[in-house]
Image: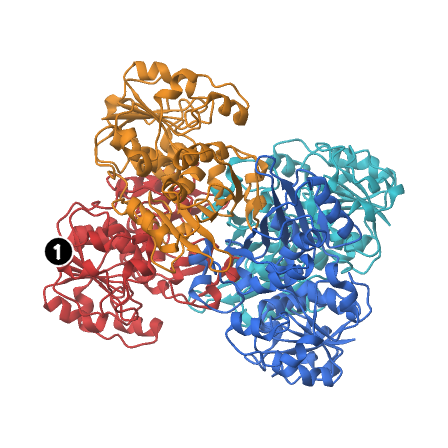
Chain colours: A cyan, B red, C blue, D orange
Amino acid sequence: MKVGIIGATGYTGQELVRLLQNHPEIELAYLGSSSNSGAVYEEMFPQFSGLSSSMDAGSGLGTGKLDDEQVPDLDVLFCALPHGFTAGRTAQWLNRGIKVIDLGADFRLKDGAVYEAWYKVQHPAQELLPEAVYGLPELYRDKIAEKTLVANPGCYPTATLLALAPLLQKGLLQKDGLIIDAKSGVSGAGRGVALGNLFSEVNENFKAYGVASHRHTPEIEQQLTEAAGAELLVNFTPHLVPMIRGILATIYAQVTPGVTEADLKACWQEQYEEEEFVHILPEGIWPQTKFALGSNHSFLQLKIDPRTGRAILVSVLDNLVKGASGQAIQNMNLICGLPENMGLKMRGLWP
Amino acid sequence: MKVGIIGATGYTGQELVRLLQNHPEIELAYLGSSSNSGAVYEEMFPQFSGLSSSMDAGSGLGTGKLDDEQVPDLDVLFCALPHGFTAGRTAQWLNRGIKVIDLGADFRLKDGAVYEAWYKVQHPAQELLPEAVYGLPELYRDKIAEKTLVANPGCYPTATLLALAPLLQKGLLQKDGLIIDAKSGVSGAGRGVALGNLFSEVNENFKAYGVASHRHTPEIEQQLTEAAGAELLVNFTPHLVPMIRGILATIYAQVTPGVTEADLKACWQEQYEEEEFVHILPEGIWPQTKFALGSNHSFLQLKIDPRTGRAILVSVLDNLVKGASGQAIQNMNLICGLPENMGLKMRGLWP
Amino acid sequence: MKVGIIGATGYTGQELVRLLQNHPEIELAYLGSSSNSGAVYEEMFPQFSGLSSSMDAGSGLGTGKLDDEQVPDLDVLFCALPHGFTAGRTAQWLNRGIKVIDLGADFRLKDGAVYEAWYKVQHPAQELLPEAVYGLPELYRDKIAEKTLVANPGCYPTATLLALAPLLQKGLLQKDGLIIDAKSGVSGAGRGVALGNLFSEVNENFKAYGVASHRHTPEIEQQLTEAAGAELLVNFTPHLVPMIRGILATIYAQVTPGVTEADLKACWQEQYEEEEFVHILPEGIWPQTKFALGSNHSFLQLKIDPRTGRAILVSVLDNLVKGASGQAIQNMNLICGLPENMGLKMRGLWP
Amino acid sequence: MKVGIIGATGYTGQELVRLLQNHPEIELAYLGSSSNSGAVYEEMFPQFSGLSSSMDAGSGLGTGKLDDEQVPDLDVLFCALPHGFTAGRTAQWLNRGIKVIDLGADFRLKDGAVYEAWYKVQHPAQELLPEAVYGLPELYRDKIAEKTLVANPGCYPTATLLALAPLLQKGLLQKDGLIIDAKSGVSGAGRGVALGNLFSEVNENFKAYGVASHRHTPEIEQQLTEAAGAELLVNFTPHLVPMIRGILATIYAQVTPGVTEADLKACWQEQYEEEEFVHILPEGIWPQTKFALGSNHSFLQLKIDPRTGRAILVSVLDNLVKGASGQAIQNMNLICGLPENMGLKMRGLWP
């Protein structure tokens, strides 16, 4: 199976290469980058030293050189580009029989007007929106398998939806007053060079950002609205943690009257008991982002505060793996009929 | 003015020494430590090399040696001990005419039963509780000045109360549904040696802890109840950030119907416009913990989310300074009739 | 093939579990820990959630419980214990037909007197020293394959020997005046709880330690003496870097008169061109520890300073993988006749 | 005394503001920045909130606005610019009676040809080189006091010279074979935005850079040559530590035959016993960068390795304080006849 990556030099691109390297059934046949065309991949990223020599010379990658986005014939193409760079070119790839998995935001929102409101640009290919499936396998596995265009979810939405969607769908939580206080490592900001991402500005520092304005808000609301069966709004506040990888979402929700902690956990248990990548932790063990470091695994815990009656849910994952590239490969496995966990078994790096 | 520190080898003890070093009107006349009695302070903490030679030989500190908690005659004694170690000995110090500033939790809660419920030990000196004043100068300055026993507030409560107390007092926020999602650097856990505070366990990691059970909860509720004039409960969730110093509290509150963002800011403005250590940041600039690093300054910002109508407040300070030792010195200045900012003018260390 | 780990709760023990999880030809049949006997492994280390259920119930590990060091019949036993805890029990394991790979220091030094001089205890099993092989495959592959007792090298020695041993063996460097200035992440100090390893003491800090007294010194000298064919001494200074994983050794050496930079690189090239885990970086690219993070790969670069004529060599690896558990698995593969890179193909985690 | 800063928005510029804020005898009368002219300083750097309102309105700084490098009449001007931006304008400032302290590299090298060889540009004002004094007070105090143009030393040279200069001057070390293996925090790279300084690239990473080519090499050699009384060359290798502030230099030197550890320490003792900012640590305590964090203090230790006979010296300071802005203020105090330690008494921030 030939797969390729467009946007191979960003952090999610590098992470795709790292994980695909360990995948037994694929050939990494194409690495594209408009900004670094012609550069030798393993010289830019020496952690991959010796990689190209192990590739098929015929694939072009024997040279290790990055291509200028002239996508060859492939089975699957991963698009690891910022929003707005993928949608306009997707139709031609699909027409050529290439399955497309977009790690950007272009196909996540089903309503082009919502996209435009939050991303401040017109959607370049609204006609494709109905073709795309929201690729969060643990919640939408059946819908994903038959699709050729997958919108890979955002990192914050993945963490949030794993915790909230089943509970809302079962009516165990109230739709009003959901608060998602989320914290992310710096790699979520990507490899782009900006003052605010300098080590000297970030280390020994912590801040909120995008308060009441982050673009993952409508994505979360769209999927939670679908789960709850009725429109809802959330407060979503992201924060920047002085670490590279990891997302932790602390979620506050009012439970439906009469619902107990055991009810909430039973719902999670039922939803996830067969899942390899979602772990409900034993009583008293709260998720830490490092449990997930470098792996496709995610972790959940909850408690109802007996004094206020409010539920506190914590959800953890690695933003570059389950929150991006790992989930993308999980989706690839699904739409290609491979075992869903293939190439994704590695556990978190501790310490 | 002769001042001393009991518990001089913990992090708040060291921070008191650092700040008092820079205070022009005091003589650091006593450093006590039960566990390190006889050790030479500047050999334990070489950042203070040469310190003892600059001290008055007659004070005993010319030797630089830590004393075994035999408190000499002093004007002010700072107690930088864990809860339970101070209260039982306080009466004798007060009787000797020594003003006491307790950086621990022993005198913060006005109700001995609440103390016992949360700290799991009986209060050793309930009769002193009415004597103690809660030492948060920006809110209770007038009450503090005349006192000889000051309960220095906890770090999380200080950050929370600076943001919420004035708004609740003016009735601008609803008393129900207050959520305080707080994040702290690791120094808040003190200098005690524990697996969970090892660098390899904390770095590149983020977690919640003490979920719905942290001991600062009743302290926050006591003071907010006083401000609001009616009993209230909060959800308080602390988190551990892989950094040494700093607290950021993200607070969610329902505004009283009709109240605007401008109303909230006007209330803050009125409360703090004369304050040297509390800064309401300009529109669009959100607090970062590093603004406060190593300084007694604190920073506030807020916004009402126009979509949900909920107010989001962010409050930042250095947990070891405004959240502990700096505020203790501010209290010392107050109860000794010195300018409140004396020895506390240094600004945050950036980068 | 049944393998087990004694000392499974330390950092090298956890790392063995993480890597062996990904190894297709072994069954992880035994996890021992004297201090945590009876604890459920995946509750202590939730990054492995779900691990025990995937194990063979018959193996005992279906329960996930740590055993009290009652080693069952195994093909290979990894000993991940501090020095002094392994040697005394090794003979009985060998007699039972279990191959032993010791990640500690007990079998690295060939001379029991040198061991005693540096480790301050008598060696508990000097008679076994001739049986042990020093397990650095890239340098001693032929000797390792036939052995049943492997002394897995120290992390600093591995980094140092990969750079220096071939050059000394070929006579390209002078034996006098070798200086090894090495820097390590904090995980090298292990999971033991000590003040000096607290986050608040280590972060934003850098220091030398064990100056002119570190126990890896005689191990380095023993192997370099063998390579050079004549006794030599080195200056070895380790430093602590505020990061978790990674070792970088900066090595200063006088070249033999007439030797050029090209000669040195040609020697490395010849030694390592077939090696999967040792990479000589292209001109101008200097190793960074993150190239190796979480992987068994190592990286080399050198330069002769044209002004002083001295060679500067830099060697990088992950102290817990190529410097410990990864190399141990490489040795296991070797002594068990498996492909040497089996289970070790993952590349470094970046970012 | 009116002082100003040109280049006030870089890290050394911010650090000057922080330290001068605490200086009792100066008025901060001018903040210049070509790239941020017109911006309000305390909005760019909220750690200084409220700063401008405490300034003299007549000074222009009551507005808090950065000026476009139109230097007013001042007593002292600090130039915190990259090399090449200061020298060409210095003569006019000196002619106006303004004393100039250059934190950049323009006046450190006495030979314009050496400057050109290392900095790859012609020196813009060679005629001023004889006017400048190398401003390392502990070594050259007498020469500095009478000067009006001070070349503030580089951070690496300051750390290196404090350790080596007195020992070479007394002939206790051999001139050949000096090796300086230095490690710095990331703030040394300044506030300029570059991929290599991103948090995600630097954290959990360690590397050498500028191997055998760093521009501080000729500065170190110039001053050591002067101390030794004979030309010498050094090997100088800087490394990047994942921390913000701090420099540690590990120095290897051959002692002159017959010289003992006690001789070396006696020399240091004699040189520094009256110094407030240089501390020779007690036997067995090795410097850590955090001892110096945020302070103008520096720390020394040494040992002769009894096995190799080589001396190992370690020198530590904060690169932004004693290695830049703090030393600049020390120089200001000197050339203005103020107590040398004025405004510089704060000790290191620990933890």
Of A334 and B192, the residue lying toward us: B192
Residue D325 horizontal side relative to residue D55, left or right: right
Q: Secondary structure at mark 1?
A: loop
Amino acid on which the number 1 mark rests in the picture: Glu
Tell me residue A6's x, y (percent): 75, 39
Residue A54 visible in this rendered orientation of the protein: yes
Residue B124 horizontal side relative to residue A258, left or right: left
Of A221 and C297, the residue lying toward us: C297
Above or below, D220 against B165 in this view is above
Tell me residue C232's x, y (percent): 60, 58
Which part of the image, by quadrant, shows the N terminus of chain B? bottom left
Above or below, C64 against C171 in this view is below
Q: How many marks?
A: 1
Residue, disc 1: B146
Tell me residue D256's x, y (percent): 43, 48
User: Which residue ends up furthest to the right in the rendered image?
Assistant: A58
